[in-house]
Amino acid sequence: MKINHILISQPFKNSYSPYIELGKKKNVQIDFISFIEVKEASPVEVRKQKINFSDFSVVLFISKKSVDYYFRLAESMRFKIPITMKYICLTEVVAHYLQKYIVYRKRKIYIGKKNFQDIVPFIKKHYKEKYLLPSSNILKPEIPKILNRLNILWKRAILYKTTSSDLSDLKHIHHDILVFFSPACIKSLFENFPNFNQKNIKIATFGKNTLDAAYKAGLKIEIKVPTPKYPSMAKALENYIQKKYQ
């Protein structure tokens, strides 16, 4: 069976996507369909969580989305973020994105490397501060566990929610490969299609949490990314097609 049709469970971003190049190179049709939707919490919903942005002196950013929704809601709730506010960013990518909203030279910013454990030294150094953790309704369980062990004053603010998209247009899935990037996408697949039968469909997953969710759902996984040899999904897909079907 030749691979003719791949579904990427993310929205189309731009024409320079490596998946577009993959499609051209291997003569494969690539579809981009987001399996999840992100919805902003309202100021009322934030207040119901007993969150007052002015109570906190440090913001912990674990993703670019958490940056967006924190600043959006701060503005809509008419909270003027003080120049003294400190920021701890999980990765350099998140820290760089923060520049969309603030001027670096005027703020105190601390940057981790990759894992949440990397920013623990910064938190310990400023243990007397009050920490706000903006997040979605989905959060890795180890994060609150780590923060609780540090015995600091912190609070999680759910500023946006990840929900399953309506995939009724995909009632008869005819793709050869389905590509997933988060456990929420796996959840969306089965919420939309409770009786989903994998049959000959190949499954590709990115990240350990996505892989674990796929296994838990009873899926057979053909492509697991990242690996030392194939850190990107596009390269892994290209290699898979090359080895198996060409």
Image: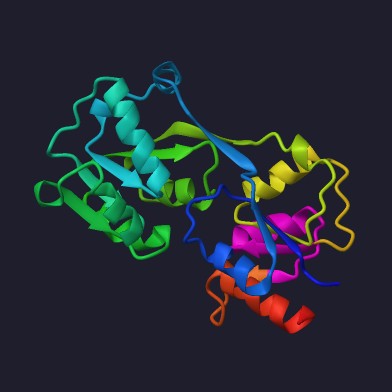
Residue extent of the magenta highlight: 202-223
| Percent x, y of residue 93 | 34, 58
Instruction: Please say whether residue 127 is visible from this viewpoint.
Output: no
Q: Quadrant of the N terminus?
A: bottom right
**Viewer-side residue, 190 vs 109:** 190
Q: In this view, does 177 lie above or below 69?
A: below
Q: Quadrant of the C terminus?
A: bottom right
Q: In this view, does 12 lie above or below 45?
A: below
Task: Report the coloring of the rendering.
Answer: rainbow
| Percent x, y of residue 145 | 48, 49
Residue 225 falls within the magenta-colored stretch: no
225 vs 156, left or right, is right
Q: Which residue is drawn at 70% across and 49% down?
A: 186
Q: Residue at x 47, y 33 (%)?
A: 160
Q: Which residue is drawn at 66% across and 62% down?
A: 205
Residue 213 falls within the magenta-colored stretch: yes
Q: Quadrant of residue 66?
A: top left
**Viewer-side residue, 50 vs 6:** 6
| Percent x, y of residue 37 | 57, 37
